[in-house]
Image (cartoon, rainbow, N blue to C red):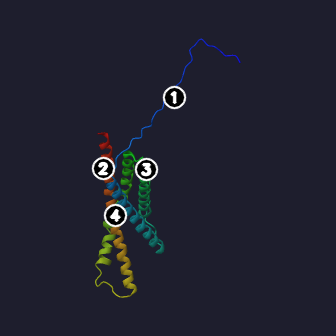
Amino acid sequence: MASVLTSEPSLVYSRRVVEARVHKYHWPAVQLNIWMLIMLISACTIIGVFATFIDIQHTLLLPVPWYFPYYITVASLAVFFILLLLYLIYQRRLLPSIVMIGGFILFVLWLTGLIVISVQLWGPDGSVSSECNIQVFGASPMPKGQTLETLAWLEQRSICQSWQAVFAFGLVGAVFLLWIMVIAYQVFADDAV
């Protein structure tokens, strides 16, 4: 075996170990847990109420208004977002930018649904609230006993209260989506110091 000699000096490559530094943010655990719990309650309440309303519409052979499936979809996205946050927390990769962008997108979608629900609940003519006040809460005398009239009145009252619950949880959800954006900004700002 013959070796080849070169007049040029040979290059020696050395391997340098580069340590990957993962930046970790310090999230307020109690606030984040409370936020996730309240948002899960809000989203699941909206999903449940509007799924029931869709079932009632189908039973009565009435068309389903567009905002029922819309708000179910938005609330489902909120549940998915919370599950994504839980996964990122478990992986220790939760970034404030992800929370701010996701929170903002959900806030816009959520607020759109809340505005539509507000118009339906307190709109100008034939609103849900005015119909409930006249036919259910203003019923005089309230039906009593084991009759179909009493059962129908109880169902109407349940539907009216469900509309009120959807509005209340929609409002709470909108406020909490703003709150998570503020928390994410605080986490980012505290880390920059």
Inter-mark Cα distance, 4 to 2: 20 Å
37 over 92 or under it: above or below? below
Q: Which secondary structure, mark 3?
A: helix
Inter-mark Cα distance, 3 to 2: 19 Å
Is the C terminus in the top left, top right, bottom left or bottom right quadrant? top left
Mark nearer the N terminus (2 vs 1): 1
Mark nearer the N terminus (3 vs 4): 3
Q: Are marks 2 and 1 in contact (CB under 8 Å)?
A: no
Q: Of the residues tagged 3 and 4, which is closer to the observer?
A: 3
Q: Residue at x 48, y 71 (%)?
A: 58
Inter-mark Cα distance, 1 to 4: 58 Å
Q: Residue 145: x and y, percent? A: 35, 88
Mark nearer the N terminus (4 vs 2): 4
Q: Quadrant of residue 6?
A: top right
Q: Are marks 3 and 2 in contact (CB under 8 Å)?
A: no
Task: Tell me the residue that label 1 is attached to.
Answer: 15
Task: Tell me the residue that label 2 is attached to.
Answer: 182
Density class for disc 2 (Cα within 10 Å; few <14, some 14-19, many ≥20) is: some
Task: Tell me the residue that label 3 is attached to.
Answer: 88
Can the viewer see residue 149? yes
Res. 169 mark:
4
